[in-house]
Image (cartoon, rainbow, N blue to C red):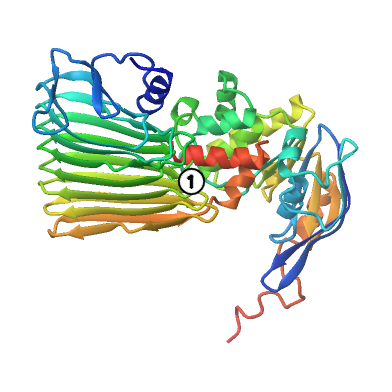
Amino acid sequence: MLNSIDKHILEIVADLHGTPKGAYNIRKNGAGVDRSITPNIEIRTKIDKPGIDVIVKPGTKGETVHIPVILTAEGLHDLVYNTFDIGEGADVTVIAGCGIHNPGEKNAQHDGVHDFIVRKGARMRYVEKHYGEGKGSGKRILNPRTIVVVEEDGYAEMELVQISGVDNTLRVTEVRVKDNAHLFVTERMLTDGDQFAESRITVELAGLDASTQVISRSVARDRSQQIFYPRVIGLNRCRGHVQCDAIIMDEARIRSIPEISAQHADSQLVHEAAIGKIAGEQMIKLMTLGLSEKEAEDTILEGFLK
Amino acid sequence: MLEIKNLSVSLEGKNGTVEILRNIDLKLEDHLLYVFTGPNGGGKSTLAKAIMGIYKTTSGEILLNGQDISSLSITERALLGIGYAFQQPPRFKGLTVGKMMEIATGKNRTCEDCNFLYNVGLCPQDYIGREVDSSLSGGEVKRIEIATLLVRNLKVAIYDEPEAGIDLWSFNRLIETFNNLHEQYDTTIILISHQERIINLADEIILIADGTIKEKGKKDEVWPLIMQNATCSCRTSCDERVGENAQ
């Protein structure tokens, strides 16, 4: 059912070697192809629109849900709505990679709308890896939209990674953080060739002592373009920190527009943004350890995006 | 053996080309420990960077065991066994101490490498996984920098002001480490320093000022000459501190 290309993509986007353990739902070319549930994690197909509901029972600990998506056909525009309900006091990992292997001249596009509710005292780690490949001239397009609510005392960690080969992406992430809840976002992105990437992250610190840390690290090579709009809005006594770091190379262009907005006098918000080339001193240091110029550059980029 | 013949280095500055080093001639033997000392801006670090290949030489030759390395790249010189520990090492977001050590050794790290961190006063278990970024203090970065040289089997090892920013306890350990290194290996060790305890380690002191070598010799020959000129480093003649008591 899954061929070698599918398996290769699953390895890259979901670190999967063979069938995952625990709950999973594998979607290929617009349809579910394989699914498994556990006593604590249920996966249901939506009735009104394409997509699934993932329901994690309260108190579920240490389980992982894999929901990878594979696109291997050209001319396909896959739109999917997934809803996640992470029950009170649960502690789970959700791995949602998407890989496109576009063999042809027509575009292949996946637009995933993910809706999360992380209930009281629950912890969720969400990993989303995006990857594209294929020799055809058809574009590989990924437009994820992720909406998250972190309820009281909840914790959500989101790792958003675009590894390579995605021609065009518009990533929208909106999170509402309630009383004493914490959100930790790390976004890592690499663009090259003529790729374009735009990321909009909006975090509303709505609850008392809500907090967030948003870290974005990106590398733009060749003629690629990136735009970042990370926004943190303080609506209560809260703490927020936004940090955007980008390495620019060749003829790439990057715009970084962080915004912090305090709507409450006890909001403590900080943002930092930096764009620059690889420091010459860093290259020299690694070359004095015996690396070639190319190896030194790769080592610096690999570390930066790790 | 490292031989430097008639070496000059000019660098581009704001006001045009400046000659930093002039006609340097130097022979540095295996297994000896040299200290480069002299006033700030005299050319010590420039000479070290010229040996490493970081600065291009304007004229002259550098020979490592008879091989002319003047036109080789930094990488090629590193692979031939020349190492340079920066005075102010750069920081790297995302690169861990362990990764740096792994790059330095050129193979996967082993527990043997951890010992090199002990030698600079750092506990490997605390540091291997930490990133060499701004979360580390200046002294910590400096010690890691030194460890990246200690871990390598070098023919020529240059440490640029290794004591800078290092606390007293680690400093004692460092002196001990340099001593052991000196006793056990054939490496030509060059320490750039102003510190008397480091100068005490030297087989030979090389005094560099105004872009030339002013003196070269044993400590008891060169040290008195340095101390003679230590009170004032003004190059123009003046009445010492004449303005201080002026009414």
Name the foreground residue: A264 vs A277: A277
Viewer-nearest residue: B76 or B193? B76
* Point 57% across, 30% down: residue: B101
| Left or right of B194, for residue A185 | left
The x and y percentages for residue A21 are: 28, 13
Q: Chain under label 1?
A: A
x and y percent of residue A20 in the render?
30, 15
Q: Amino acid at mark 1?
A: Asp
In this rendering, position of residue A152 left or right of residue A28: left
Q: Quadrant of the C terminus of chain B?
A: bottom right
Residue A298, above or below B8: above
Classify mark 1: helix, strand or loop.
loop
Residue A33 in percent (x, y) is at 26, 19
Give the residue displayed 41% in from the left and 44% down from the top.
A167
Which quadrant of the structure image shows residue A141?
Answer: top left
Image point (81%, 31%), residue name: B31
